[in-house]
Amino acid sequence: MQTLKAMSTRRNNISTRPNVLYMDVHDLGTWLGCYGKPYVSSPHIDRLAGDGARFTQFISSAPICMPSRVGLYAGIMPHMAGVMGQDPLNNNVVCMAEYFRRAGYATFVSGGINVLNTPEWAGFTNVLAAEKGERAKAAVDFLRHEAVSLDSPFFLSVSFQRVHRPFGEDYDPDLPDRIKVPGGLPDEPETRKDLATLCRKVEELDKHVGEILGALEEAGMAENTIVIFTTEHGIAMPRHKHTLYNGGIHTALLLRAPGRPRPGRVYDDLLSNMDLLPTLLELAGLEAPPNILGRSFLGLLEGRADWQCRDAVFSEQTWGRRSGQWYYTPMRSIRTERFHYIHSFREVPAYVDNSFVNRFRHRREVLQEWFSNPLPEKQLFDLKEDPAELINLADSDEHKELLDSLHGQLFAFLERTEDPILEGYVRNKANLPDITQWLEQPDGSFALEPDNVIYYTEEPF
C-alpha cells in the first residue's frame, strides 16, 4: 500500500487523495476504556485506538462546546473568532470543511454541526438528513450507498450528542460501586450513579462509532481514509466542563491514517486542539494555512528529528449558557507538561451543571460544601504530584518564580492575540445579563441560588 508521502509526489488528480472521516462528540473528555477507565465499555473506540494512535495530552482551547470547536474547526483561539461564549463564529473565519471543499473534496455532514453557523457557511456542500439521534445511521447509509460512487475524495463529519446531558436514569446497577470518582467530586451515591449513567451513554456512543467504522470497512475504503475521533472538552461534571481545570480541557484524540502511524502508538506530547486542523490538511497532502495558531504534528507522526513539542498550551472561558441563562466566569490558563496556571478575572464559584445539581436536589448541602468557594485569582497546580488539582501552589514561596513566569507567558499570549478580556468586562453577543448560579451573601460567602430558580434536566436518584 502506498504511503501518503509517496502519493503526494504525483497528485495530479484530486481522486488520489485520502478520504477523511471526522468524528467528534459532546462532553466526553477522556471517559473511555482506552484512556484508563476500565469501567467504561467502549470496545469499538478502543479498537480504533489500537489500529491507529492515541494522544494522551490533547488539550482543548475551551471547556464548553462552541468555543472549543473554534480550536478544532479553525485552528485559532475562541476570542480570535469572536466567540466569547455560545456564539457563532465571525464570518471571516475559515473552517476545516471549507479548506477541504476548496481543495476539491466532496464535503458531507451528518445532521448538522454543533456551532451556531450554518453547515453551508462552514464548508459543507451536502447535509445528510438525520433524525434526532440518527446521525450515525445517516453516515452509515452514505458510506454504504453513496461514497463509493463519488469521483472525488470525501470529507465526512459526524458530531455526536450522545453523551451530552441529560444522561437519564439508565445504568448498570453493578457499576456505581466499581467507578473511580474523579478527585474534586463528592464520593457520594448520587455521584456514582450519575457517572454510571454517563457510562451507559458512552456505551451507546461506542455502538454508533462501531457501526460507522464497520460501514467504512464494508465499503472497501478503510485503507484510504483518515479517521479522526475526538471530543471538544471534558465531561459535564463539576470541576470539569465549564472550568479550566484539567478535567475540563483534557480531551481524547484518536487518529488512524494510511501509512502512518504504526498501529497502537501512544503519544504523550503536549498538543492543543488547534493543532488538529493543520495536521489533517497535511495528512491529506494539502497546505496548512499560515494565519492560524495551530501547529501541524505530522512531524511527530513521521518521527522527524526536527519535531518540537509545544512548551505550553492555552485555554479560555468567558461566558457560558445553560437553560437559556448566561453566566460570566472569565478565566484564562496556560498548561505545560507538568504545571497548570489558571487566572480568574472574577472571583466567584465555578458553575455546576444544573443536571448534576438536580441529582442532589434533596441534599443541596453537599453541593454547598464542595463547590461554593469562589475561584481564587491565581491557581497553580503540579499535575505530576497533584493530578486532580486540589492543592493550589500560588502562595508557595518555592513556586513564586514559576508562578511569575507562567503568569507573564499567559498575559503575553493574551496581548499577542488581542484578547478583549484585557480591556475589562466582556459583553456577550446577545447583550444579555449575567445570571449567576451562586448568590453572594452579606458576609461575602456564596450560596446556591434558591431551588425554585434552577431549571432541572435530570431527576434525582
Image: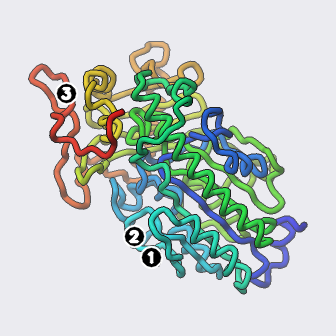
Q: How many marks?
A: 3
Measured as percent of width and height from the top left, residue 91 is found at 39, 72
- The answer to whether marks 3 and 2 mark residues whose Cβ atoms lie closer than 8 Å is no
| Label located before the other in sequence (3 or 1) | 1
| 279 displayed left or right of 85 | right
Q: Which sits in the foreground, 186 or 259? A: 186
Marks 2 and 1, how far apart in space? 7 Å
Marks 3 and 2, how far apart in space? 37 Å
Q: For the residue labelled by badge 3, is the local secondary structure a helix, a strand or a loop? A: strand
Q: Check the picture and name the quadrant holding the C terminus.
A: top left
Crowdedness near tag 2: few (<14), some (14–19) or many (≥20) residues, C-alpha within 10 Å: some
Crowdedness near tag 1: few (<14), some (14–19) or many (≥20) residues, C-alpha within 10 Å: some
| 112 displayed left or right of 423 | right
Q: Which sits in the foreground, 349 or 403? A: 349
Of circles 3 and 2, which is in front? 3
Q: Is residue 440 something that shows in the picture?
A: yes
User: Which residue is depicted at the point 29% across and 20% down?
Assistant: 369
255 to 177, vertically: above or below: below
- The answer to whether marks 3 and 1 mark residues whose Cβ atoms lie closer than 8 Å is no
Q: Quadrant of residue 337?
A: top right
- The answer to whether marks 2 and 1 mark residues whose Cβ atoms lie closer than 8 Å is yes
Specify the amino acid type for callout 1: Trp
Specify the amino acid type for callout 3: Ala
Specify the amino acid type for callout 2: Asn
Name the residue that disc number 3 marks.
447
Name the residue that disc number 1 marks.
121
Q: Which sits in the foreground, 178 or 253? A: 178
Measured as percent of width and height from the top left, residue 115 is found at 41, 63
Crowdedness near tag 3: few (<14), some (14–19) or many (≥20) residues, C-alpha within 10 Å: some
Name the residue that disc number 2 marks.
117
User: Which residue is depicted at the point 58% across and 68% down?
Assistant: 137
